[in-house]
Amino acid sequence: MRRTLVLLLIAVSLTALLGLTAGCGGDDETTTTEAATTETTGGGAMADGAAVFASNCAVCHGADGTGGTGPDLTSVTGLTKERVIDQVTNGGASMPPFGDQLSADEIGAVADYVVGDLVGQ
């Protein structure tokens, strides 16, 4: 009886674990994290630049982009989306590259956020 109970508990635990891990991955269309996405009307996911910035950039550039370890992005003038994409993807100066950590959609979204919402505030 005790052995049956132990085996039942193990089976239930494994089933629960498999259920939790089934939601991790498998969607080749989206490589962004749930915290950094917003749903589109088409059912897919689109990167949220503010969320990507908060989880990857704010540690150096500050939550509001005013700087810290990294430069103050709000005081930069003439910064283009293409320049931000290049900098985030490849790094440079003292900034590490994020091209292997973030998807192209996430990098594009954070570039839109930086250029559209932070630069020249």
Image (cartoon, grey):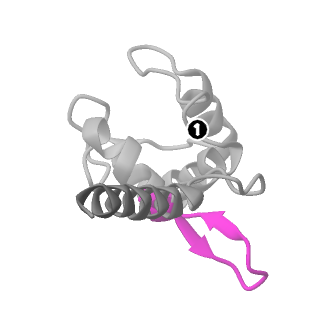
Residue at 47% from the left image edge and 53% from the top image edge: 52
In the picture, residue 29 is in which quadrant? bottom right
**In which quadrant is the C terminus drawn?**
bottom left
Write down the residue under mark 1.
Answer: 84
- Left or right side of 104 for 59: left
- Left or right side of 96 for 25: right
**Is residue 7 located in the magenta-colored stretch of the structure?**
no
Please name whichever residue, 20 or 112, is drawn nearer the observer in this view of the structure.
Answer: 20
Please name whichever residue, 84 or 96, is drawn nearer the observer in this view of the structure.
Answer: 96
Residue 33, given in percent of the width and then of the height, sits at 52, 55
Q: Residue furthest front?
A: 1
Task: Point out the stretch of residues depicted in magenta.
Answer: 34-51
Q: How many marks?
A: 1
Residue 39, given in percent of the width and then of the height, sits at 62, 77
Residue at 38% from the left image edge and 42% from the top image edge: 57
Q: Is residue 119 visible?
A: no
Considering only vertical position in the picture, is 42 above or below 91?
Answer: below
Considering only vertical position in the picture, is 103 above or below 6?
Answer: above
**In which quadrant is the N terminus drawn?**
bottom left
Residue at 66% from the left image edge and 66% from the top image edge: 46
In the picture, residue 7 is in which quadrant? bottom left
Q: Residue furthest bottom?
A: 41
In the picture, residue 64 is in which quadrant? bottom left
Find numbered disc 1 in the image and state the secondary structure of the residue it sits on.
helix
Please name whichever residue, 53 or 39, is drawn nearer the observer in this view of the structure.
Answer: 39
Q: Residue furthest top?
A: 93
Considering only vertical position in the picture, is 11 above or below 71?
Answer: below
Considering only vertical position in the picture, is 41 above or below 1?
Answer: below
Residue 44, given in percent of the width and then of the height, sits at 73, 72
Residue 41, given in percent of the width and then of the height, sits at 73, 86
